[in-house]
Image (cartoon, rainbow, N blue to C red):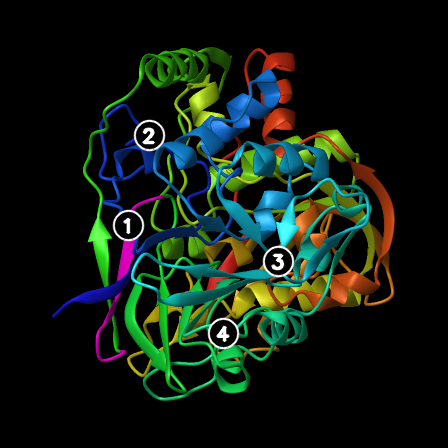
Amino acid sequence: MNTRLTVYFTSDTHGYLYPTHFRDLRPHPMGLLSMRFPKDENTLIIDGGDTVQGSPLTYYCHVSGIDSPVARAMNDRGYDYVTLGNHDFNYGPEFLGRYLRELSAQCLCANVQDEKGRLPLLPGTVRVLGNGLRVGLVGIVSDWVNRWEKKENLVGLTVSGPLEAARKAIAALPPHDVLIGIYHGGIEKDLSTGRSLSDTDENIACRLCEELPFDLLLTGHQHIALAEGSWHGTHIVQTPCNAEQYVKVTLDEDGRFHSSLCGVPDHAELTDGEQQLFSDLNAWLDHPVGHLSQPIWPEDHLTMALRGTPIADFFNMVQLEASGADISCAALANSVRGFDSQVTVRDVVASYVYSNTLKVLEVTGEILRKALEQCATYFQVDARKQVRIDPHFLEPKEAHYNYDYFAGITYAFDLNRPAGSRVVELKRNGREIAPEETLSLCMCDYRATGAGDFDFYRSCKILREIQTDVSELILNYLRAHPLVNIPIKRSFQVYP
């Protein structure tokens, strides 16, 4: 059967261009440079955002003042359209504007307005293919950007609600035969059962399908590998993160969409410039920056959450020194490299992968207890009295980074008790912390927004902010301390 339209879709590549995750030197099946998209006049190549931040490569380019290679890689692959992801705002509007102007692709994002004209954006467009098919396209991003992003990175920008912005953009489109939504946001319902997966509006893909006439919705943000999804008559797809897969979608002559997830080879044909950048990057990554009293390697996430991990302890040591706070909390990414006793830059940027800064909040004992109770929801006890990770942290998206490890206090969870009443000990310097007692708590700026169901933090007074990226604070700490003693004492207990 003839194909009327072919779409190649990537999303959440996070600057992973090369066939490696940088945690080691072995090649891995991933990377935008390993992708090739056969293209003709009836083919569109589209990206769903989160492209310029999130990998050791993008961090290296940012701190070294090197032009990002992401736009060139996308231009070489013939991208037609992109939308913005929440992490694309992390380096500020000027950086984002330069990236978008370097792109040959048109950026469609109906719910972002730039009063200063730095971002070349359109809400939507209609593309007429070689076969005459008129394809309407509208791009949108989750408006939770307003909660997560630093205020200085949104100066002059307005990020409005995606549903109404998309509705308005669709109404303004010229006549079209097929309508595609490019949404940097995820799915809030189980597509098989209709069960609600979230009670917030961070992800509203299903609502978009219910209220707007999209034929195909390209989604992102959650990093779910999804093809052949359907909701309310709309075909839905999504890719995993870090350029590990892409989606191919076709439209047949009968008007039916078909989609499949496509793997990526573990090698890429590099230009001389790409090879030189890769060599320079690896030399920088393998540069030693300090020593630990012992190597600290990750275990599985459940084991670390139950028993503690010196990786989180180390992060908290850095945060406490940088902030001068009474208490610190830190989370681990879904994937963490860990640290050898001789620490390299690679260890740091592949273990703390986010572009976070720090905030110090004034919290009461009551707020602190709420935070620990939220952390305790990470655990679920099954009918056999076995502890496992609560599915809420695993689907629709892995979110181990929403479990925090605390320093400066001692505490205990009793998992025999129902969620909300599991904190059975909360002390500082051997003394019980009273509900009305106030303390300073250091955390990353992401958590300070209330993200991860910590909404109560939003009401807390901000005492101070540390605007240096946490990964840079870790590097500076290692350079300032010739030998870092890693403590082995646990600050918390989990029963049973």
From mark 4 to mark 1, how far is it between C-alphas? 21 Å
Q: Which residue carries the number 1 mark?
A: 245
Q: Residue at x 26, y 78 (%)?
A: 256
Three-letter amino acid code at the position of disc 4? Ala
Where in the figure is residue 18, as x and y percent of width and height? Answer: 33, 30
Q: Nearer the viewer, mark 3 or mark 4?
A: 4
Tag 3 secondary structure: strand
143 versus 263 height, above or below: below
Instruction: Work out whether mark 4 precedes mark 2 in sequence or the reverse, and give the earlier one.
Output: 2
Instruction: Work out whether mark 3 precedes mark 4 in sequence or the reverse, and give the earlier one.
Output: 4
Where in the figure is residue 149, as x and y percent of width and height? Answer: 70, 49
Tag 2 secondary structure: loop
240 versus 358 height, above or below: below
User: In the image, is 417 to the left or to the right of 38?
Assistant: right
Instruction: Assess disc 3: are there few (<14), some (14-19) or many (≥20) residues with their C-alpha within 10 Å of its C-alpha.
Output: many
Q: Residue at x 56, y 49 (%)?
A: 107
User: Toward which corner of the image does residue 444 lie, by quadrant?
Assistant: top right
From mark 3 to mark 4, how far is it between C-alphas? 39 Å
Instruction: Assess disc 2: are there few (<14), some (14-19) or many (≥20) residues with their C-alpha within 10 Å of its C-alpha.
Output: many
Where in the figure is residue 429, as x and y percent of width and height? Answer: 73, 47
Q: Which residue carries the number 4 mark?
A: 205
Three-letter amino acid code at the position of disc 3? Tyr
Where in the figure is residue 99, as x and y percent of width and height? Answer: 58, 34
Instruction: Work out whether mark 1 precedes mark 2 in sequence or the reverse, and give the earlier one.
Output: 2
**Labelled disc at residue 18:** 2
Q: Which residue carries the number 3 mark?
A: 411
**In this orientation, which residue lies closer to the viewer: 288 or 440?**
288
Three-letter amino acid code at the position of disc 1? Gln
Three-letter amino acid code at the position of disc 2? Tyr
Range shown magenta: 243-255
Instruction: Assess disc 4: are there few (<14), some (14-19) or many (≥20) residues with their C-alpha within 10 Å of its C-alpha.
Output: many
